[in-house]
Image (cartoon, rainbow, N blue to C red):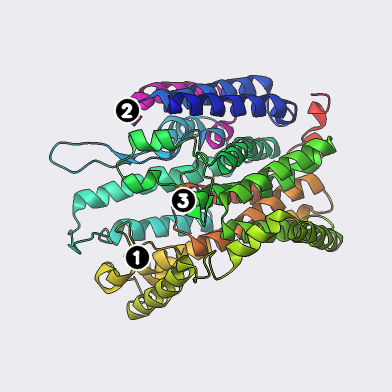
Amino acid sequence: MANLKALAIVLAIGTAVFWLAKPVALQFSGEGDFSRRRTVWLLLTTMGFLSPNIWLYSLVAFPLLWWASSKDTNPIALYLLMLHVIPPVPVSIPIIGNSGLFDLDNYRLLAFCVLAPTALRIRNTDRAGPRNSSAMDILLLAFGALVVALYTCPDLVNRAYIPDSFTNQLRRAFLFFFDVYLLYWVVKRSCWDRRALAEALAAFCLASVIMAVVACFEFVDHWLLYDGIVLRWGVNPHDSEYVLRGSILRAEASSGHPLSLGYLLVVAFAFWLSLSTQVRSKMLRVSVALTLCAGLFASYSRGPWLACAVCFFVFNLVGPRALSSTARAGGVACLIAVCVALSPVGAHIYQAFHARGPSGTVDPTLVYRERLAQRGWELVLAHPAFGDHFPWPEMADLRQGEGIIDIVNTYLGVALNYGVVGLSIFVGFILLAIGKAYARARELARSDPDLARLGAGLVAAMAATMLMIADSSFRQGAAIMFYVLAGLAAAYSARVKSPARDDAGMLSTNSGVS
């Protein structure tokens, strides 16, 4: 009964947001695409809550997503809207004589049903973005080669070492292709013009606004609406635990974790900064921004809060009229900080950042992160080139109550598994994406401010990403959007010039839509 009630609430929120957002959404996409995506979102949400397992859900989702992607004029917008239609609950695909083929979740369903057919269509059409391989492609393939060649034994409580095999290498190659390279490649080749890029960003903002409203409900009602799906589908009981800070519930909506929700909303905030100037209604511009910030607060995650501030300033530094925009942003930030500090919310934010918890004891998460950083980097320095592929015995005292060693620092995790070589490739890949998008945005700052703002939003989102993954594991939404952002930056920087009419303004033909 609780599951049906949760479904009713989520459908009510989703329907209301789609209805309110339709005038804005139609400025970036066609009415047919919008209506189809809305229908698919509502159907998949309903199936997610009603299905007893992921297999029944997949029987409906697979043909529905395949059909929708074949009809959609911009499948990446469809992909981003459906990215968190349900939580990313991993379930192992059973196979005779083995513990499982690989895990299936909503991310991989979308890769099989949306990205793969889109890639095939791109290969058979002239409507595609830049075809030449770039330094980013080479770095990503080099990182993939390390992932396939270097085997890190899984973290097991009994410290047992499971040897690698050729079958495991094939599995890693297959999953890297579908999870990472296919995603980056399709985004890069699909979002190569102004309209497709803006439509993809708008679709992600729409999905994030729904999650933000759900998160606010969860925060106020102290009830995780999607927890029933995780309980029925998941195999790890810790996945369905409520995450608290003191007595406050940290909302997660359909993201899978409060940190993941916070990260996704920060990226959506960056996207909205770049799109909002193209929306004529000031009330709508402010309402969307406030909704995203409210959802961000409901996640009660310190890292995303800081990243959101960084994102705001980076966007203004990169966009048109950088000096005046940054000065204005500083004034707005000071005003907001004063208002928040004087409000009841300010006390909660101060307590969340304070090194001591509500009872006066030192926050154990901060202590854990300090110990993890010290021990982890010692192991990296002991095996600098290609990492330590069995570090768990030396880190056994860092094992948490969940039975795992939580590497809550992506850079440390990459360095442990693949050494300084792997870390350099990983960081170089995203830095190159930032550099390309920044150069393109500055080039367009005077001639095409709207297009320059799209690049500024991408730079701000990637800068925020680099900050946030320093304080979280590389999984769920962060791992997906890392490569989505890189693909968008690659497409943006290598964009083929559109006709003069397109350069004059993408939305001029849609200015009458309401």
Question: Eyeballing the image, is 474 above or below 46?
Answer: below
Q: CA distance from mark 1 to mark 2?
A: 33 Å
- Quadrant for residue 3, please give it: top left
Tell me residue 97's x, y (percent).
Answer: 12, 40
- Let me know if residue 438 appears in the view: no
Mark linked to residue 417: 1
Which one is nearer the viewer's eye here, 130 or 482? 482
Mark linked to residue 513: none
- Tell me the SS state at disc 1: helix
Q: Which residues are magenta?
A: 54-80
Which one is nearer the viewer's eye here, 444 or 33? 33
Tell me residue 162's x, y (percent).
Answer: 18, 58
**Kind of residue at badge 1:** Asn
Packing grade of label 2 (10 A; few <14, some 14-19, many >=20) is some
> What residue does disc 3 label?
243
Q: CA distance from mark 3 to mark 2?
A: 28 Å
- Tell me the SS state at disc 2: helix
User: Mark 3–mark 2 contact, CB under 8 Å?
Assistant: no
Residue 78, magenta (yes or no): yes
Packing grade of label 1 (10 A; few <14, some 14-19, many >=20) is many
In the orientation shown, which residue stands out farthest toward the left? 97
Q: Residue at x 78, y 42 (%)?
A: 286
Tell me residue 61's x, y (percent).
Answer: 42, 25
Q: Nearer the viewer, mark 3 or mark 1?
A: 3
**Kind of residue at badge 2:** Trp
Mark sitting earlier along the chain (3/2): 2
> What residue does disc 2 label?
55
Tell me residue 190's x, y (percent).
Answer: 57, 37
